[in-house]
Image (cartoon, rainbow, N blue to C red):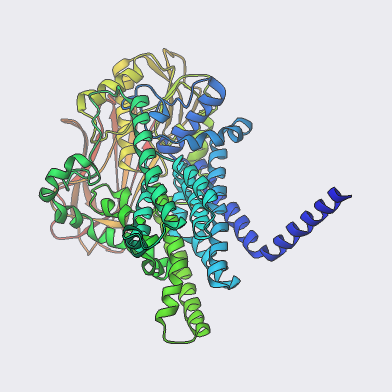
């Protein structure tokens, strides 16, 4: 009977809690559904990458299905052992293995990441409710966290264990505020498990807290006061954090050493002249180029700082004891020349999101006390500010997606379908070499490899030696996409390297050619089993103005074949006669050339010029050039199309 009463009371308590926090639960569910959908759409549209979704999916797959502990192949040039823990020490991944073992696939990782970030809203809500005594304000802060541009950026950039730092740290900071010390340390240590340097923000949090407790510390030193539990907790935070940092980094070094001497890690602080947190540079601190490093991309860095504090109405700056870890974290980022450290849309933001959100909530007290009005009036002003901040946060978040995520509801294009049709020709356990945007869809194979872009850290000889090893008969298939919807320079460069290596080896035959998606098979001499002509379109928006000098419109490697290029351009004014010369070069050779003559004098009419050419070697990229343009008229290029003639 007592057991029945216990369960009845528990059920009533849960039901009551659910009703009380119904709106919060709705927000969490909506966030999970929307953000998980966007993450999956990006992946299905080949907007995910080997760096880093492919890395983590392959590592989980080899652990659960191949008996290789977090083994991956993406960075064998820098991490020959292939152990993920030899690059970053992230034991938190072990907690995700049971979920992945049940539901194998990159989708599982993306959904788990979204759920984790969504759960982070609960400690934030309870903290806001406890400090402000207003449920409506707590809900506003919760919505600010869920729409925070940096939360969205972490969520939508592939998969990273860094994302789990956010909810674990939020729980930890909530229990610190509540003085529940055991729970604080449990969640703090769990947050440490996300990455080898995850303890650093907590160390700075400890130092900041001790600074603001310096009065109490002074009393202790003069033996006029006893040490309170808060000070002990801050001291323990620093001690545990320092021990974890050095222990985790030592383990990472031993698990990942023996990297190739031809790959030297690039310096994100090349302009500064040294890593700002490296103790070995203490003797040369005065000689570092601080001004030059800070001036590099200064406008972007300033905008980045605004995106951190603006969406929370600048409240984080009113609680420095919690906001200081954020300042310390972004200090080396602003001295860096590596854009992802100070740009939206990357996972690095995860290590300051909790401190920004919590400092914003606790900063409200200083805001209210600074207002020379009644408490209710101050709340009214603050509520209006936060609503404006919410609108700002949403606008920044939407802009972020437009600029970096490229998410569309119609994510699967005709070209994407060509890639999926080609993937169907690969046997389940086949070894394959491919590009970074296709690799995540093949990362459930232990013998899937990716052609790396030409990183600055690569010595040229080491890079080509590594790439050649991928093509020297060790892989049965090579999959190249020379016509992606989402074009970036590194994609074009990698496809050029792949086509050159295929011709160099002379051992790969074409199995499939679908709209520029080419599947090669080792020692295959049969006919192409599935074929559709290439239709590559490069649009110039805004329209590109052609000057009188040589203009390289486009560079692209193409498989051997016969092609035609068509260029559409507009005349800036009426003219007649020769407009320009269109030339196609490959290395030192000119494959085709044509003088373009205006067919009409109407400046509102689009002109077009076509030129056929034959590619007999795919060892080098082609350059599409416009030169000798008429000096009496302005030319504007709208687009360029390359199609196959056979």
Q: Nearer the viewer, residue 5 or 453?
A: 5
Q: Nearer the viewer, residue 584 or 511?
A: 511
Left or right: residue 44 versus residue 644 is right
Farthest left residue in view: 287
Up/down of 280 relative to 146, above or below: above
Residue 556 x, y percent position in the rendering: 29, 36
Q: Residue at x 20, y 56 (%)?
A: 294
Task: Locate residue 436: give its quadrant.
Answer: top left
Q: Position of residue 371 (x, y in %)?
A: 42, 83
Residue 630, percent across and down? 15, 55
x and y, in percent, of residue 46 in the image: 47, 40
Q: Quadrant of residue 515?
A: top left
Residue toward you, 197 or 263: 197
Quadrant showing the C terminus: top left
Decide if residue 177 is on the left or right side of residue 102: left
Q: Is residue 235 visible?
A: yes
In depth, the one of 115 and 352 nearer the eye is: 352
């Amino acid at each position: 009977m007592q057991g029945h009463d216990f369960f009845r009371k528990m059920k009533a308590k849960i039901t009551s809690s659910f009703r009380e926090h119904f709106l919060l639960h709705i927000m969490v569910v909506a966030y999970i559904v929307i953000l998980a959908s966007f993450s999956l759409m990006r992946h299905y549209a080949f907007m995910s990458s080997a760096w880093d979704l492919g890395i983590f999916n392959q590592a989980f797959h080899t652990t659960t299905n191949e008996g290789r502990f977090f083994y991956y192949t993406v960075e064998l040039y820098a991490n020959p052992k292939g152990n993920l823990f030899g690059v970053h020490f992230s034991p938190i991944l072990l907690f995700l293995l049971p979920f992945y073992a049940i539901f194998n696939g990159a989708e599982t990782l993306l959904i788990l990441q979204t759920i984790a970030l969504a759960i982070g809203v609960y400690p934030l809500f309870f903290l806001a409710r406890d400090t402000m005594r207003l449920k409506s304000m707590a809900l506003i802060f919760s919505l600010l966290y869920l729409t925070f541009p940096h939360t969205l950026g972490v969520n939508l950039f592939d998969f990273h264990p860094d994302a789990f730092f956010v909810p674990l740290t939020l729980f930890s900071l909530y229990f610190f505020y509540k003085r529940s010390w055991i729970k604080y340390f449990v969640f703090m240590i769990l947050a440490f498990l996300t990455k080898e340097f995850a303890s650093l923000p907590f160390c700075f949090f400890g130092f900041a807290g001790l600074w603001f407790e310096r009065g109490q510390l002074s009393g202790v030193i003069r033996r006029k006061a006893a040490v309170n539990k808060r000070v002990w907790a801050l001291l323990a935070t620093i001690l545990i954090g320092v021990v974890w940092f050095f222990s985790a980094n030592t383990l990472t070094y031993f698990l990942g050493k023996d990297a190739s001497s031809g790959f030297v890690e690039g310096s994100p602080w090349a302009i500064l002249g040294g890593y700002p947190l490296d103790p070995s540079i203490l003797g040369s601190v005065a000689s570092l180029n601080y001004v030059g490093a800070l001036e590099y991309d200064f406008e972007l860095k300033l905008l980045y700082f605004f995106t951190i504090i603006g969406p929370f109405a600048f409240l984080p700056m009113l609680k420095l004891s919690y906001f200081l870890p954020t300042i310390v974290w972004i200090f080396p980022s602003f001295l860096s020349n590596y854009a992802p450290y100070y740009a939206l849309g990357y996972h690095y933001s995860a290590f300051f999101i909790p401190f920004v959100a919590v400092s914003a909530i606790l900063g409200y007290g200083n805001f209210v006390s600074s207002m020379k009005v009644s408490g209710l009036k101050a709340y009214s002003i603050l509520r209006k500010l936060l609503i404006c901040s919410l609108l700002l946060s949403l606008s920044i978040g939407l802009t972020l997606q437009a600029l970096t995520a490229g998410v569309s509801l119609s994510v699967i294009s005709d070209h994407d379908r060509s890639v999926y049709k080609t993937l169907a020709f690969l046997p389940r356990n086949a070894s394959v070499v491919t590009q970074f945007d296709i690799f995540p869809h093949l990362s459930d194979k232990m013998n899937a490899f990716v052609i790396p872009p030409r990183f600055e850290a690569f010595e040229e000889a080491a890079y080509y030696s590594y790439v050649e090893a991928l093509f020297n008969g060790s892989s049965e298939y090579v999959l190249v996409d020379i016509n992606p919807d989402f074009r970036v320079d590194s994609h074009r460069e990698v496809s050029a390297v792949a086509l050159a290596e295929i011709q160099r080896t002379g051992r790969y035959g074409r199995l499939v050619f679908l709209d520029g998606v080419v599947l090669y098979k080792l020692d295959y001499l049969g006919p192409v089993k599935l074929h559709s002509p290439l239709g590559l379109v490069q649009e110039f928006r805004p329209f590109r103005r052609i000057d009188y000098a040589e203009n390289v419109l486009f560079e692209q490697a193409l498989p051997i074949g016969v092609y035609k290029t068509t260029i559409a351009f507009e005349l800036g004014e009426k003219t007649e006669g020769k407009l320009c010369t269109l030339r196609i070069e490959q290395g030192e050779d000119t494959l085709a050339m044509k003088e373009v003559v205006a067919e009409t004098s109407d400046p509102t009419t689009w002109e077009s010029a076509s030129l056929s050419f034959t590619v007999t070697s795919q060892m080098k990229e082609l350059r599409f050039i416009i030169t000798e343009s008429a000096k009496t008229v302005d030319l504007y290029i709208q687009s360029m199309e390359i199609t196959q003639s056979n």
